Amino acid sequence: MKKVFLICAALTAMNHLYAQKAGVTITGKVPAIFNGEYIFLSKGAGFKSNVLDSAKVEKGSFALAYPLEDTIQGSIRVSKKTDGKFYYGSRTLFLKPGDNVSLTAKDTSVANVFESIALKGTPLTQQYDQLQGSLKKVNDSLQVVRGAAMSRMRAWQEGKLIDTAAEIASRQVMDNLLKQKSDITDVFIDAHPDYYISLLAFKESLGSRVKDVPAAQQRLSKFTPALRNSTFGLGIKDLLNASAKLGINQQAPDFASKTPDGKTLKLSDLKGKYVLLDFWASWCGPCRAENPNVAKAYNQYKDKNFTVLGVSLDREGAHDKWTEAIEKDGLTWHHVSDLKWWNADAAKLYLIHSIPQNFLIDPNGRIIAQNLRGEALQQELEKLIH
């Protein structure tokens, strides 16, 4: 019995030692203004982040230790309001077990005291900084365009009319900037197939659904085996497998949902016609700006074996807003919604994480095109329907 106890004690000590070695430590020096405040280590980004650990700043120094078991994206942050002034620091981090990070921040005259500081002991964050440096110019331009788009969205929510021409022009500018960002990122990825950040950037470039699965699989094969078989790499493989089921010439997955009057309608009920499966919502400005293009195509081809099934991602309790938008925009086709917002069953089935998005389905139920916007929908239908 004593022998068993000693073995268990030894294993416990070894596990504790391993956890210490596998964890991550973050130490640093910060301006004295933050004395008495806490530095927070969080996992995730934005509103999806959650605090993992914290450490009190004493005499301008702090030390964090966390038993990290896998690579994460996270951040450290600190804030202090005194004498009417607000001091703030936040820094994105990419951490792996065993990292021993150190930093020094001195300047309190900048908006973010952590923004431009150098970090030691975190190679993945250095990879991230390298990529962000090459993307800075295009990201700054994207921020301006997105800010203008948000201003238009707020104006629309206040009851002002949507400027369709301005919305389309803004989308074209944004698409051009996103293309520049994609090209720069691709060059970075190709130059660094052994970088974890390259794999992360590749995943982000794929979006929520991959259109060209074979091409994506070919690019994934260029990463090192260690990256491909990491937790993140295996997640990409799962995404590719799910996306393959929504590719061109694949059978469109069937689903059922409720019409505005509470009846059940299935996608397969429309089989035998060309169907535009259109994901949208009453609250979505770009969707509402796109509706006139869909209406134009529908009115021209509705008597030629073509119809539209609109799937709204409106929220629970927004039934009236949904139906009012249908009437106001003149959307005289089939509509369904389970009023679950982004958790809509059909949205999850079709890997929808942004709208507007659509799928063109042929009379046999096969997907033949995706995301036909503006004149592209009209042009595609003109080729198919005579």
Image: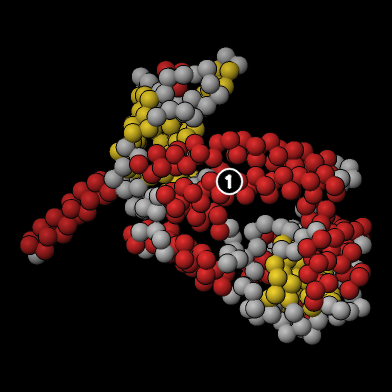
Which of 17/142 is in front?
142
Say if 55 sits above or below 251 in the image: above
Of all residues, the one furthest to the top in this rendering is: 83
| Residue 36 seen in the figure | no
Decide if residue 362 is on the left or right side of residue 73: right
For disc 1, the marked residue is 181
Of all residues, the one furthest to the left in this rendering is: 3
Element under disc 1: helix
Residue type at mark 1: give it. Answer: Lys
Which quadrant: the C terminus? Answer: bottom right
Q: Residue at x 58, y 18 (%)?
A: 85
Q: Residue at x 44, y 53 (%)?
A: 190
Where does the image place residue 129, in percent across and percent down from the top left? 45, 38
Q: Residue at x 22, y 54 (%)?
A: 15
Which quadrant: the N terminus? Answer: bottom left
Where does the image place residue 331, in percent across and percent down from the top left? 89, 65
Decide if residue 297 is on the left or right side of residue 369: right
Where does the image place residue 103, in percent across and percent down from the top left? 37, 29
Q: How many marks?
A: 1
Where does the image place residue 353, in percent across and percent down from the top left? 64, 59
Decide if residue 181 is on the left or right side of residue 50: right
| Residue 145 occupies quadrant | top right
Colour logic: secondary structure
Q: Residues within 10 Å of mark 1 (few under 14, many from 20)?
A: some
Q: Residue at x 69, y 41 (%)?
A: 146
Decide if residue 267 is on the left or right side of residue 194: right
| Residue 27 seen in the figure | yes
